[in-house]
Image (tube, grey):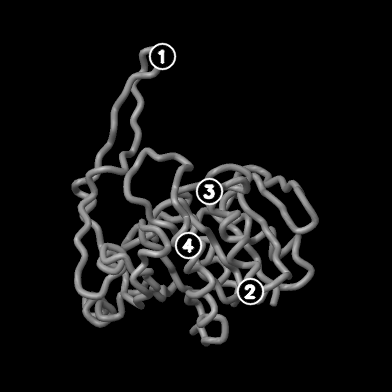
Amino acid sequence: MRILLTNDDGINAPGLYVLEKIAAQLSDDIWICAPSEEQSGAGHSLTLTRPVRMRQHAERRFSVTGTPTDSVTMALKKILPAPPDLILSGVNRGANLGDDVTYSGTVSAAFEGALAGIRAIALSQVYAREGVGNAVDFSAAEQWGAKVLKPLLDHPFPPRTLVNVNFPPVAGSEVQGVRVVRQGFHDYARGSVVEGTDPRGFPYYWFGLHGIEHTPGSDTDLEAIAGNFVSVTPLQIDLTHESSLGSLANLYRS
């Protein structure tokens, strides 16, 4: 089985090395193509206004000067000798829960794989507090990653879908199990924009990560993580709100 690894934290991110360890339990045919620098929050963006450059670090290890989507595209079209059987994106440093998946480069890299008809899974390690930099405990992902992935390898994925996995912010031994749950939602009205002044006296603004209210409901990824379970959520690329089609169509009938 050929596996492509990517992420949005960059080619040197600790979580990518964790993902390599997980993937090595599944296959010895592993390829890596990731952004040369961190691209958190890049979403499903594609570089169109400047050239993308590629660097080879080892026989099957590459980086590109672009987004997670660029990385998957370059891997599929320029690097791999044949399409992979599986794309794994992560392990992201931080949660990709609820509607955060719409911002996530980690999830978007998996979306790109799903668009290409390849089985794709995004993996993220939740951590308990902000401001810890790279000092994140990935032990839950390390101990549970292969356990979560193995049942998915032979399970059929419907076309244009992917799976989003989040590991709770506890030691691997404290994980309570795995729950298959739906996507939750956040209250972004409580989010923050931090204002500061640079050394030349000009104001700058930094989108804050604090103050976003988590409102876990029944059987959501937010609730699963709060209970120290690994959350497994199937996602689809089709964002159409089916129940609105009829009422909107009626607006244009004469």
Quadrant of the image containing the N terminus = bottom right
Residues packed near mark 3 inside 10 Å, few (<14), some (14 to 19) or many (20 plus) = many
Q: Of label 1 and label 4, which has the lower sequence position?
A: 4
Quadrant of the image containing the C terminus = bottom left
Label annotation for residue 68: none
Say which amino acid is labelled 3.
Answer: Asp
Q: CA distance from mark 2 to mark 1?
A: 50 Å
Say which amino acid is labelled 2.
Answer: Leu
Q: In the depicted view, which residue is nearer to us: 181 or 229?
A: 229
Say which element carries label 3: loop
For label 1, the residue is 199
Answer with the quarter of the image where residue 237 lies.
bottom left
For label 3, the residue is 9
Is the residue 197 above or below the residue 9 in the image?
above
* Horizontal side of residue 42 vs 33, given as left or right: left
Say which amino acid is labelled 1.
Answer: Pro
Residue closest to the far front: 173
In contact (CB < 8 Å): disc 2 and disc 3: no
Q: Of label 1 and label 3, which has the lower sequence position?
A: 3
Q: Position of residue 145 (x, y in %)?
A: 50, 68
Task: Tell me how many marks there are.
Answer: 4
For label 2, the residue is 26
Q: Of label 2 and label 1, which has the lower sequence position?
A: 2
In contact (CB < 8 Å): disc 4 and disc 2: no
Answer with the quarter of the image where residue 85 lies.
bottom right
